[in-house]
Image (cartoon, rainbow, N blue to C red):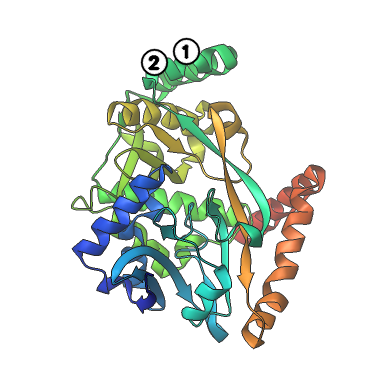
Amino acid sequence: MSTRRIEVVGPGRLDADDRKIWREIRAASGAPANPFLDPAFTAAVGRLRPRAEVAVLREDGFPVGYFPYERGFAGQGRAVGLGVSDSQGAVLRAGVRLDARTLLRACALSSWEFDSLEAGQDVFLPHTTEALASPVVDLADGFEGYVRALGTRSPGFLKQTLAKERRLARQAGEVRFVYDETDPGALRTLMRWKSAQYRRTGRRDRFAQPWIARLVEGFARADGDPECRGVLSVLWAGGRPVAAHFGLRSPTVLSWWFPAYDRAYGRYSPGLLLLLRMLEAAAGDGVGLVDLGSGPARYKETFRTRDLRVYEGAVVRAGFGGAVHRLGREPVRAARRFVRERPGLARTGARALEELGRLRTR
């Protein structure tokens, strides 16, 4: 009979063997190689968030699983990088059976919150409160195959988008796309655009949180881990950036993370042009899947080929910490769910947030 032990360590204490085993377990699972569930992402967050930890599950001394999380007040836990991570969960070898609350007890956690739990996470699925669609673009048949299918589904969209690109070139100057831009100035421009977008739409500015800005800057360095590294893509017109995106990629999956554009060029739909050119370059670079992430957006419906499922929810144990979590988070989660289930109300709320954002930026 095997002996199981759970050891809690800081992400910085995971060695090369741990990273290798973690990735082997992920590869064997058959799940998409989403970079947010790579050990390099957990390590990067751990360097900036000192309360990030990893529970290492061992059977007869050999690692069979890894569970990354962040610890908060009263033992409340959350997924690593919650709010900016698009894929969350535990990394468990096939056949490992585990009870979620037993795992939390071993980690001295009273709760564990997630908002993008990966499908197939059987340990946590009983604790989900909502299933969300996460649109993806399949590029397994190459970009040409994808464009043929897109032209069949939305012939008008593709024709109009390419016409806008030609008009942009005529009116603003040569259009140039760089898939993997290394200019730090372009990254700063993207972050400035994105911060303005957050404020304009009444949302919390993620880049106002120093750890998020530093996380992105760290992944933007050219010497990143090839299993989980940043990619800055920029659309230029007349020698100036008009749209940009910063995402994370593994060898086979690119995650759509922080897109933004210069509103002065909005009539040319530069964000759509950027995404189209990025898909072409990504397919040529070995990417088979682009994950557009959950959250409503009309352009995602146009570009998507199918949806993955991600889940929102929390594992909560009885006790003081669990009660604190329920009091603080459940009303917020219920309110968001109420709005999402009523599209008309959601649109009204979005317009109100945009108006509030305009007032704040005056």
- Which of the labelled discs sits on residue 148, or is there none? 1
Q: Does residue 362 show up?
A: no
The percent coordinates of residue 331 (x first, y second) are 75, 69
Q: Where is 277 relative to 348, above or below?
A: above
Identity, as a three-letter code, of the amino acid under mark 1? Arg
Residue at 76% across / 61% down in the picture?
A: 335
Label 1, label 2: how far apart the Cα atoms are: 6 Å
87 and 206: which is toward the camera = 87
Identity, as a three-letter code, of the amino acid under mark 2? Glu
- Quadrant of the rendered structure where residue 135 is? top right
Residue at 32% across / 59% down in the picture?
A: 39
- Quadrant of the rendered structure where residue 278 is? top left
- Which of the labelled discs sits on residue 144, or is there none? 2
Provide the secondary structure element on which disc 2 rests: helix
45 on left or right of 328: left
Does the CB distance between marks 1 and 2 fall below 8 Å?
Answer: yes
170 and 185: which is toward the camera = 185
The percent coordinates of residue 237 (x first, y second) are 36, 29
191 on left or right of 296: left
Query: Farthest residue toward the front?
Result: 1
